[in-house]
Image: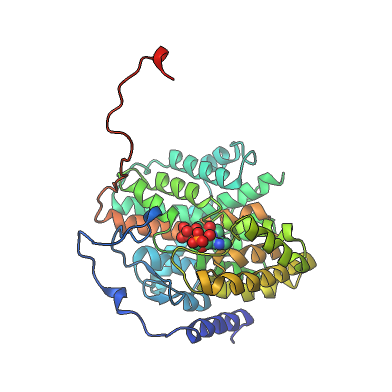
Amino acid sequence: MTTQIEKLIQSAKEKAYEETDSAAEPALTSAVEWPVKCNVGLGLEGAVACETTIGYVNGSKGWLIYRGLDCFDLSEFSSFEETSYLLIFGKLPSSKELADFNAKLAEYRILTDEEWKAVNALPLGKGHPMSDLRTAVSVLGLLDPTAEDTRVEAETEVSIKLLAKVPALAGIIARVRKGQEPIQADTSLSLAADMVRMMTGNAPSEEDAKVMDVCLILHADHGMNASTFTSMVVNSSMSDMYSSIVAGIGSLKGPLHGGANEAVLKTLEEIGSPDRVDDWYANARTKKKKVMGFGHRVYKAYDPRARVLQPLAELLSKRHPEVEKYYEIAVKLEGKVISELGKEKKIFPNVDFYSGIVYAAMGIETEMFTPIFAVSRVAGWTARVLEYLKNNRIFRPRGIYVGPAYVEYAPIDKRG
Ligand code: CMC
């Protein structure tokens, strides 16, 4: 029987395809001839860093595919575990492959005594939870005797460990920050459901578990975004997978990237009520402030992930008047931004605009939103690091020197 969530995903897909020409683009499959001639803008806009078969963001149509599979279909039919397998190993698993993969994930999910003690001994909660997570992943790397083995097989195994352990770290971080006892993983639950349980202390309902699973699927990979590129750059020196993921977490943390989901909730709180949206927006425009959760380097159409998350946010927000108010503010703000910037600048909501409302409805604290993004993005980071490692060449772009050619050295007492 089709559930309400599946129906919402189907109608999001229909809307996305209705608004664009649904034919695939031939450019999708053309091979790269090195050296590539391309126009590069500031922030490496337009630069080509590698060839990949992992995923494709069609910015003009607002589509996202992983290994050729549409993100709407994966959201409806797949699981985060299966999607991670797809990203890392390049194909959907057979039943046996999925069972073996899940068994490995289950084995790694329970932190060892040594890992549990070391992570719980950290001064968690003093800074941002993404800093907690960055440090905790680094500690796992210190404790893993295989961490320095940079062969593809060894780094693949570390990738599976990280997929399994990062949700447990997010759980510990969430609870320690609230002054609560952390809880170990329950491997009878899915990664998504167990992450919610380890954060909130309660196993989610079936509906919430599916919604969180969809959230993890939708955040799992997204082209050559800043954190993915960061992870790849770190690994390209033949460093190690833990260092690469630690770096990815550091990059994702910023409000222009994954940190936007937290910033959106703060914006909605600041606006306070739907009738204040117009004034808030006018003031933001006067001050040339960006509206968090809008805009994208690649999407010049509605982000397909936001298309799925918006109706899910609507569904879940109905449970709490406070969260419902945030949803109403968000819808009004979306209308305002699209009417003013949609046509002119192609600014639409991105993945971070509605995700926080979904998490808030599940009782998850605002500061934990970006760590949830990281839990999911481990799949994309590791998949792309592994793909690049198979044909590795160290990243080394140029910075064009525009300073003076010669400055005479002045002794310290002669400097102005
Ligand atoms: N609100 C208002 N104007 C915007 C926004 C926004 N959120 N985003 C872009 N613009 C305008 C920007 O002011 C600029 O206008 P002009 O040409 O007049 O100077 C134009 O659109 C191009 O913007 P940009 O900053 O040059 O674009 P970029 O490709 O360098 O940055 C971005 C992309 C996502 C960082 C940016 O859109 C942004 O800062 N958005 C808000 C933060 C956010 O939601 N980030 C999450 C991104 S999606 C999830 C992820 O990958 O992490």
Left or right of residue 203: residue 221 = left
Q: Residue at x 29, y 46 (%)?
A: 398
Of 390 and 41, the residue lying toward us: 41
Which image quarter: residue 41? bottom left
Left or right of residue 110: residue 334 = right
Q: Residue at x 44, y 38 (%)?
A: 142
Instruction: Name above or below for residue 255 compared with residue 416.
Output: below
Q: Residue at x 59, y 67 (%)?
A: 212
Of 63 and 247, the residue lying toward us: 63
Q: Is residue 332 visible?
A: yes
Instruction: Name above or below for residue 7 compared with residue 60.
Output: below
Q: Looking at the rendering, in which quadrant would you find the N terminus?
A: bottom right
Of 119 and 249, the residue lying toward us: 249
> Could you tell me residue 373's position as x and y percent?
54, 58
Left or right of residue 230: residue 271 = right
Specify the farthest residue to the top.
413
Q: Residue at x 72, y 44 (%)?
A: 179
Instruction: Name above or below for residue 393 compared with residue 52.
Output: above
Left or right of residue 415: residue 337 = right
Q: How many marks?
A: 0
> Could you tell me residue 76's position as x and y percent?
52, 78
